[in-house]
Amino acid sequence: MTGWTLVAPAMVCLSLAGCYERIVEPADVFGTVKQGATYSPASRMIDDWYAVEAIDTQTFAINEPNSSQYNTSYLLVGETRALMFDAGSGERPAGSRSMREVAERYTGNKPISLILSHFHYDHIADAAAFDGVTLIDRLDIRATITDGIYTIGPVESHGMEWRPLKVAQLIADSEVLDLGGRTVAVFNLPGHTTESVVLFDRYRNQVFTGDFVYRHLGGIIAFASGSDLTAYKENSTRLLHLTTADTRFFGAHGIPRFDRDWLALLDRELDKIITGAATYRYAAHYLAPGIPWRVYQNGDLSIYTTPLVAPPLFWSKWVLLFVATVSFLMLYFLLRIVRMALVPVLVDRSGE
Ligand SMILES: [Zn+2]
């Protein structure tokens, strides 16, 4: 009996793990490019780490081809100031230039404002190297600022560190930043995270999307408590309405450039998810291997989500019943084990 009480929970765990198809590994994020390879022959290497591509004479994609998630940050330069969108993956080798030092090669002496697409660890690494950060003006962000400092914590960043950042400016949703001869609108589009920001240069018809939408293996991710699939759908529709068929989009992972059809596909799939019409399968994911991930796939586009994001969307009553039954059985077996371990001890003591 003792053997079975130990073996049975282990078997339940193993069979549950076997239900998940392990499909998502770090190497999967690159799509058609390989880690270390540049996506564009026009890229110029700096420190053997950054691959900088001029999108036009005042707009630069700063890619990190060797980073584990193939990150790209962007530099938008005006006549009087510049805007840095994201601050690097944090995987650059010791002694290499910071994202700020790389940006300064293209901005001369112009001041650089830093905006983070969101607070995940792989977008904020060199943020402290800038003269403060421009944050989206939200009540939850305001409430966290103390003495002009906003601290990104491990829960927000999914990293290990606390990162105190000087707040240079708060900017409202839809507000326009003037870089001198160039204006950029800033939009707060929750979905991937609550603070997710997208930049729109209407004159050049360029949109910089961070992790709100990018194109690498089609892996759009909403997996943590700050993600919200209903908001995601609302904001993908909003971004579609803001843009036109010939808007060029630039994301933060993989080959950066994509067109509006990709956003339209995301919008349709999110609609299916929140109306319960989407089909899915389960998988394990290297970002959080201990929990079941649900994968919605249409062609090259996959959307990954977890029970942490949207419990009513994620769990059907049958899945809930299954999980409740398994949890109950595991608890029962655990109690049996504890009781069997304690009874001899108590009997011994009573005999003393
Ligand atoms: Zn992210």
Image: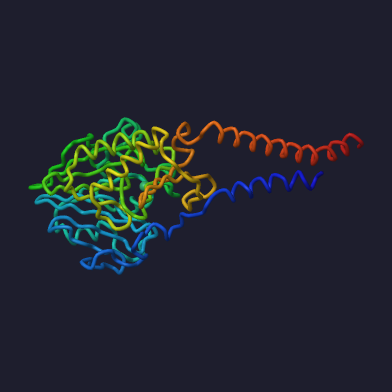
Q: What residue lies at 23% left-to-right and 35% top-to-bottom?
A: 173
Point out residue 79 in the picture as x, y percentages from the top left corner. 9, 51
Point out residue 180 in the picture as x, y percentages from the top left corner. 9, 47
The residue positioned farthest toward the left in the image shown? 181
Quarter of the rendering containing residue 254:
bottom left
Point out residue 20 in the picture as x, y percentages from the top left corner. 54, 49
In the picture, measured across the screen, residue 334 lies left or right of residue 228, that is right
Q: What residue lies at 60% left-to-right and 36% top-to-bottom?
A: 322
In the picture, measured across the screen, residue 338 lies left or right of residue 130, that is right
The one nearer the camera, 34 or 139, is 34
Can residue 146 be seen from the camera position used here?
no
Can residue 289 be seen from the camera position used here?
yes
The quarter in which the N terminus is drawn is top right
In the picture, measured across the screen, residue 290 lies left or right of residue 121, that is right
Q: What residue lies at 26% left-to-right and 34% top-to-bottom?
A: 137
In the picture, measured across the screen, residue 185 lies left or right of residue 286, that is left
The residue positioned farthest toward the right in the image shown? 351
The quarter in which the C terminus is drawn is top right
Quarter of the rendering containing residue 273:
top left
Point out residue 165 in the picture as x, y percentages from the top left corner. 32, 45
The one nearer the camera, 115 or 111, is 115
Q: What residue lies at 56% left-to-right and 33% top-to-bottom?
A: 318
Image: 76 above or below 140: below
